[in-house]
Image (spheres, grey):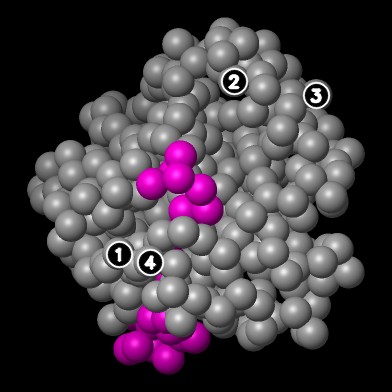
Amino acid sequence: MDTPEVDVVVVGGGIIGLATAYQISRRFPEHQVIVLEKEKVLALHQSGRNSGVLHSGIYYRADSLKSANCRDGRLAMQTFCEQYDIPHEICGKVIVATDESELGRLDEIYQRGQFNGIECAKLNADQLRALEPYCRGIAAIHVKSAGIVDYRRVCFRLCELILESGGAIHTDTRLLGVSQLKRQIVLETTNGSFQTSLLVNCAGLQSDRVAKMCGHQPEVKIVPFRGEYYELSENAQHLCQNLIYPVPDPAFPFLGIHVTRTTFGTVECGPNAVLAFAREGYRKWDVNWQDLWDAVGYRGFHKLAAKHWSVGIEEMRRSYFQSAFLASLQRLIPAVRAQDLLPGTSGVRAQALRNDGSLVDDFVIQKEGNFIHVLNAPSPAATASLNIGAFIAEQSADVLDF
């Protein structure tokens, strides 16, 4: 059987892979782009299991890829959603300090937002209550440019545009092996072989493994963190007008348990962040022994656990005991009661961890010959996806401009 030759193969059918394929097809319309996705449907994992928030870019260091891509990426995503009639809304959010110990960090976030050119304003307690009547806080930041969006709808529209441009998307196609044949790359999959000039690894939760298949030795390992959500009952949805966030812990690249209105008309609370026992395990009892050993057998994880064991225990309390989750939520909205919390969805975040035990707090995109590997793309990657895709398309130029 002949091996099909294509110009670009993108591994991974989440929002980063689809946005990358879309932007490459726009930048190089004469080249064929295909996407390989191991699942039967697109956007099954991180892209379809998140808070659906359109981030402003207020949190990120000015010299980071997150900062460079989030603000412009948000504007690009807004334009895309307006152009293709995808549900979204710029509703704004508040970042809330609930005690004096958080005021210093809140001010640092405000100063960073000012430096990054984000439209934001300081609020006192009365001004906060005017925006969020049921939220308790002594001070807050109002970020006007944050919003909500249906990222799965974004993914499906990207899929349509890729197909319209002459590209192809192969679902139910798992990558089995990769080899180099002179300047070409040969991919063996469960759906046959493919030959390509450029491989872009956007495999998310499996990105470090795909990188190793390609002969790349990443300096990070993906450690999966499960985040669980509750939904507010219909009778309690009035407790949140838009988006309510706590002041995040600067030691971790997580934003804490927050309350967010969605484009579906529901209100979600969460997520926590606990070690997942399977990279694609969405229930507490889901276990994949290879995934678990990859995480707990990694030297970097030992160092992370030794340094932050108390935080890990607290996150597990919030996972296994609704009362602990509720207590965290009541710091922001005291009127929430246990009967207001309905079981919601869960997601697993692909978090890159270094050998020294530090969590990577920026996007990691590495180019090696005719391979490009996206090795860390946590929040705000969905917001920034169109910009990330354009960045990767630009990095592809030396391979595709021939």
Residues marked 4 and 3 touching at CB (< 8 Å)? no
3 vs 1, front mark: 1
Residue 303 to residue 365: above or below: above
Task: Give the residue at mark 1.
Answer: 122
Q: Nearer the viewer, residue 47 or 170?
A: 47
Q: Secondary structure at mark 3?
A: helix
- In the rendered image of this protein, does residue 129 appear above or below residue 381? below
**The magenta stretch spans which residues?**
80-103
Q: Earlier in the sequence, mark 3 or mark 2?
A: 3
**For the residues bearing labels 3 and 2, Cβ distance under 8 angstroms:** no
Disc 3/disc 1 C-alpha distance (Å):
48 Å
Q: Position of residue 181 (x, y in %)?
A: 35, 28
Tell me the kind of residue under disc 2.
His
Quote the CA–CA distance across marks 4 and 2. 33 Å
The residue at which mark 4 appears reads as 124
Residue 105's x, y, as percent? 36, 42
Q: Nearer the viewer, residue 72 or 399?
A: 72
> Which kind of residue does numbered mark 3 sit on?
Trp
Where disc 1 sits, the SS reads strand
- Dot 3: few (<14), some (14–19), or many (≥20) neighbours within 10 Å? few
Q: Earlier in the sequence, mark 1 or mark 2?
A: 1
320 left or right of 32 in image: right
Tell me the residue that label 3 is attached to. 289
Which residue does the numbered mark 2 point to in the structure image?
308
For the point 66% across and 19% down, which residue is it? 309
Q: Is residue 288 magenta?
A: no
**Disc nearest the viewer among 4 and 2:** 4
